[in-house]
Amino acid sequence: MQKLTQLIQEASRLGNSSAESEVDRIMTICNACRYCEGFCAVFPAMTRRLQFNKADINYLANLCHNCGACLHSCQYAPPNEFAVNVPKAMAEVRQETYIHYSWPKSFGVLYQSNGVVVSLATSVALMFFLWLSTVLSSNLGVPLAGNIYAIFPHNVLVLIFGAVFGFSVLALGVGVRNFWKNISKGHVSVAAISEATGDVLTMKYLDGGHGEGCNNADDGFTLWRKRFHHFTFYGFMFCFASTSVATIYHYLFHLDAPYALSSLPVILGVLGGVGLLIGPIGLLYLNLIRNPLHGDPQQKPMDRAFILLLLLVSFTGLLLLAMRDSSVMAYLLICHLGLVMGLFLTMPYGKFAHGIYRTAALLKNAIEKRQPNSLKLGSD
Amino acid sequence: MARESGASVTLLESAPKEWRGGNSSHTRNIRCMHDAPQDVLLESYPEEEYWQDLLKVTGGQTNEALARIAIRESATCRSWMKKYGVHFQAPLSGTLHLSRTNAFFMGGGKALVNAYYRSAQAAGIEILYNSEVSSIELDGQKFIAANLANGRRIEAKSCVLAAGGFESNIEWQREAWGIDEDGASPADNFLIRGTTFNKGVLLKHMIAAGVDIIGDPTQAHMAAIDARSPLYDGGICTRIDCVSLGIVVNKNAKRFYDEGEDFWPKRYAIWGRLVAQQPDQIAYSIIDSKSIGRFMPPVFSGNESSSLDELANKLGLDVEVLKGTIQEFNAACKPGTFDHTIMDNCHTEGVNPEKTHWATTIDHPPFYGYPLRPGVTFTYLGLRTDETAGVFFGERRSKNLFVAGEMMAGNILGKGYTAGIGMAIGTAFGRIAGRNAATAANRE
């Protein structure tokens, strides 16, 4: 074993970062063992390769859901001399890929100290809306029967949020497109797309491969991480649907907010808001009791900032609905819009990106597994 | 099983929590008898075929009655394993030859160990880590108490010994293997594939206490593994699977055995012993680029070299002798149709030793070389037992002392090995010992 350090260095190939070299080292060990093949998509994808180049490593890292199953089952996990910790190595590379594929490139730095970035972005957004309200409206502190446009005219909101959201979608889109160009070759079939879509919508790889869930605090399995992710994900989608329906109402049917409690935008918004309360609270709790060996501890501020921001968005949104007829409506509106703006601003440069890159990796996986395996390794 | 039968149970684990469960952490499957396809198991594997396989690998050094108990239990034990949290999965890639006979644990043996410990804890079994048992107090054949290395004494109405073999005790290995003709101690060059905690402390103590033993201390399951592996716990990833595709030379750069005698899974366990018999217990598996992609990827680098001179230098072999060996081998390779998935017709003529299959010339750079050492998986020396899993003293069976696991596997496995048999024996006799220990305790 005296040569191990030397071998590790030897394994680090030219052009790889130290995090990528670590994944290379670990995947070489895993490929010689393969006990974890049943847990997720990472290990079957690994067995299609004998060596791991930069693109392979970035792909595998984003395919990893950080479920922890392979760490707790690993005969080579620390304190074993091989010191294999797949979830940690993958998490470190994941952050590098987010940074590397950021658009504009110089914004990638925002992934570092992300907790601070999210706090600052949100604070600035809050100040902005506070200032804007004083410029545009003299109705602060007056009950307005839920008419938010009395504070901020509809077109002003559309302009501001449309621009920021549009930029975020563009930035994430360009990033993931560059990521895709590097990792992918092969035919995007309908079957592959539908499989990947299913993997995303069901979060298949958070079930542990056996249906009992992933690991969180220890070697026992839990389905709660998957469930809280579902609350969060579908909560977000419901909120998005609520806004979309409201936009259609506004432009197509000339039905303006405020909408009745029984209206579709409000029902969707409430369902989404509740999902975005339960999900992030659960995820925050699980994050706090998470086994310290899972993932990259340096990214915890990023994880928690995103979770807390989602939580604050849904909390203020629901509160705004509940108190829209009261005199504090304007202040709640300012808070809610500021927080939503904070979320939109940091979407391409924070934890939100994990879902996008993961989806791309899952699609790549669905394509790749349909291609014939070029290796004929015989039997071990 | 003892807890299920109503006994109050304490588990004394010599290792700290992160190393618990001994060599089970390195296992990956259990060989199971079945008469029809069963979830992860294909076709059928009847009792008789299983028994014949066992008879063949042990060369008759087995106990048919006990072997058949283990075989039959293997047909039914999986539902019990599942009940305690073990998940099974389809055979791993590269293990097609085991898809009929062996059920793979999802995540391997450590996942199984975790599941068992979680279930044990949930069932109210007390688990004491860092609790090496140094001696057993007996009254005749009767178990009285276990004395821990830390000074604690634990009394109980019955006891199951499951403390493994002595493969991690280098001193004892040295003693067993003695000194070779070069005046060196071969055991000094052995690597231990599994846990560092199988020091055989209890085994030695029980032998001194007069138990009936079984097995030869020099008999151990020994595979040829990468010489760069850690001294302990290298496990499965240290295997070198290209032996049958190329040639193997010793430190004098000379071949010494037919590399193509049979498929590697059937031969890897004899190669440990073959390497142990070579000077300095080292050998080198050499292949050329034609073999890349035809065998399971090894964990360490293959010393990729563009010429044989470079490879010989990297491996520390005599350049001229190695080139001579390879030249002679290449000249002896007869034309044939290479196919590493069958026993093909590529063989040598006129070289000693012959290579009887998969013999192709080594002439397509880059060349690769992997150093090999003997890797001890486990030892066979153990306590004699019968269908009750009871411990014997001078042919008299103890009423409340039982034995399980590697410590008794030698009753069934006098030598040799076949994948998943250790877990079959361990599971069968672990459950028998537990049940009988509970009965013995309730009788008191």
Image: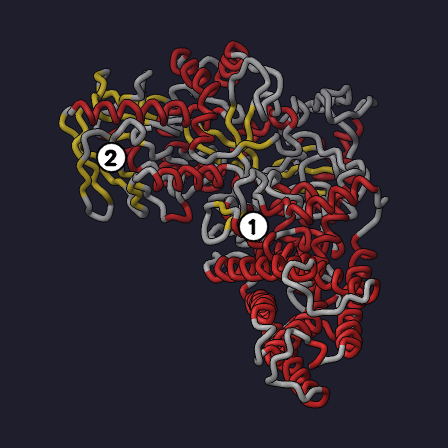
Q: Crowding near pointer 1: few (<14 within 10 Å), some, many (20+)?
A: many
Q: Is residue A44 visible from the viewing direction of this image? A: yes
Please state, as top left, top right, bottom left or bottom right, where the N terminus of chain B lies in the image. top left
Task: Tell me the SS state at disc 2.
Answer: loop
Give me the residue at 53% from left, 16% from top: B34
For the residue marked with disc 2, what is the amino acid?
Answer: Ser
- Left or right: where B315 falls relative to B209: right
Relative to B90, say whether B306 is above or below: below
Q: Which residue is mark 2?
A: B8
Is B280 positioned to the left or the right of A97 in the image? left
Closer to the camera in the image, A61 or A276: A276
Q: CA distance from mark 1 to mark 2?
A: 37 Å
Q: Residue furthest top?
A: B48
In this figure, which residue is indicated by the disc labeled 1? Answer: A227
Provide the secondary structure element on which disc 1 rests.
helix
> Which kind of residue does numbered mark 1 sit on?
Arg
Res B167 → quadrant? top left
Pick the residue in front: B19 or B106.
B106
* Colouring method of the image: secondary structure
Q: Count every numbered label the image shows and give the total.
A: 2
Q: Is residue A201 above or below residue B244?
A: below
- Which residue is at 23% across, 18% downward? B397
Task: Write the residue at 49% across / 45% down.
Answer: A221
Quadrant of the image occupied by residue B321: top right
Q: What percent of the width, then of the height, locates residue B192?
A: 47, 40
